[in-house]
Image (tube, rainbow, N blue to C red):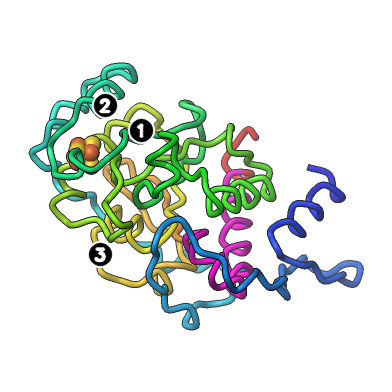
Amino acid sequence: MDETRRRDYLAAMGVSIWTLRPGMEPLIAASPIEEAASVVPERSVRPESPPQDPPPSVEVPSESAIIEPAAPAKTTASDSQTMDWDALEAAVVACRACGLCDTRTQTVFGVGNRQARLLVIGEAPGADEDRLGEPFVGRAGQLLNRMLEAIGCPRESVYIANVLKCRPPGNRDPRQEESQRCQGFLLGQLRLIRPELILAVGRIAAQHLLQTDESVGRLRGRWLEFGPERIPVRVTYHPAYLLRSPEQKAKVWGDLTIVRRRLDASGTG
Ligand code: SF4
């Protein structure tokens, strides 16, 4: 991505750039543009204890942790680990394994490049997603798109999925049994995509994926790993939270640049 375009994307994200002296390592600092105070995110996301993170541009590889996924729950997706894409998608559409099937407009399977190097995992569909059948399509989704564009990973180049495939009514948090019943589908998507990296956005996605109660603030700033393949996981704040707390955008930009660097270091584009 050329510099002018990158700066345009950062400006669109509300992240401003400091000009550095020649020879200095680029550090991303931000003085975020204020979002309108009346912004209402499409999903209700709890505040994510922001202030206790290391600087966003600092990696702490020594703190890497191996966290195994939860044992697959007994769900209608219990045999999803042998399904191809079509079968998996059909199983999601037909699923009635938890009560969310009674209140959904439609299921929200996931979208994007099925050979993606980067898998973005969010929480659950909101009202817009439930209506349109695609994850991250409201204001938070637009911000996520700009964030991904800013690191040269446009939406169509990654795969985006949620922990839950159906909307919790009233945008409440997913219940544990709902996440457990649904997780076979996400594991099926992971098996088919085989991503190099996972970006978990928001508390629910991170806690479910990593089977932990730690806050996003504590999970950020280090590489974690998922599953027997030890897929590297980076945790960052949910874009809906950023709409309410734009001062956190600099941290998210730091998380994303680290993801970009790891993709660059590991391979082909
Ligand atoms: S949320 Fe998941 S487990 Fe529950 S009905 Fe929807 S697809 Fe099935």
Q: Which residue is drawn at 35% across and 33% down?
A: 109
In the rendered image, which residue does mark 1 sit on?
A: 109
Position of 168 with respect to 245 (left or right) is left
Residue 209 image offset from top left, x and y in percent: 30, 53
- For this rendering, which residue is in front, 259 or 86? 86
Q: Of the residues under marks 3 and 2, which one precedes in the sequence?
A: 2
Mark sitting earlier along the chain (2/1): 2
Q: How crowded is mark 1: few (under 14 residues within 10 Å), some or many (20 or more)?
A: many
Q: Is residue 111 above or below residue 25?
A: above
Q: Residue under circle 2?
A: 93
The quarter of the displayed image where residue 266 is located:
top right
Q: Which mark is residue 212?
A: 3
Closer to the eye: label 3 or 2: 2
Is 252 positioned to the left or the right of 238 in the image? right
Q: Residues within 10 Å of mark 3 (few under 14, many from 20)?
A: few
What stretch of residues is rendered in magenta?
237-263
C-alpha gap between disc 2 and disc 1: 8 Å
Q: Upstream in the sequence, badge 1 or badge 3?
A: 1
Picture coordinates of residue 155, whole percent (x, y): 58, 38
Note whether residue 55 is visible. yes
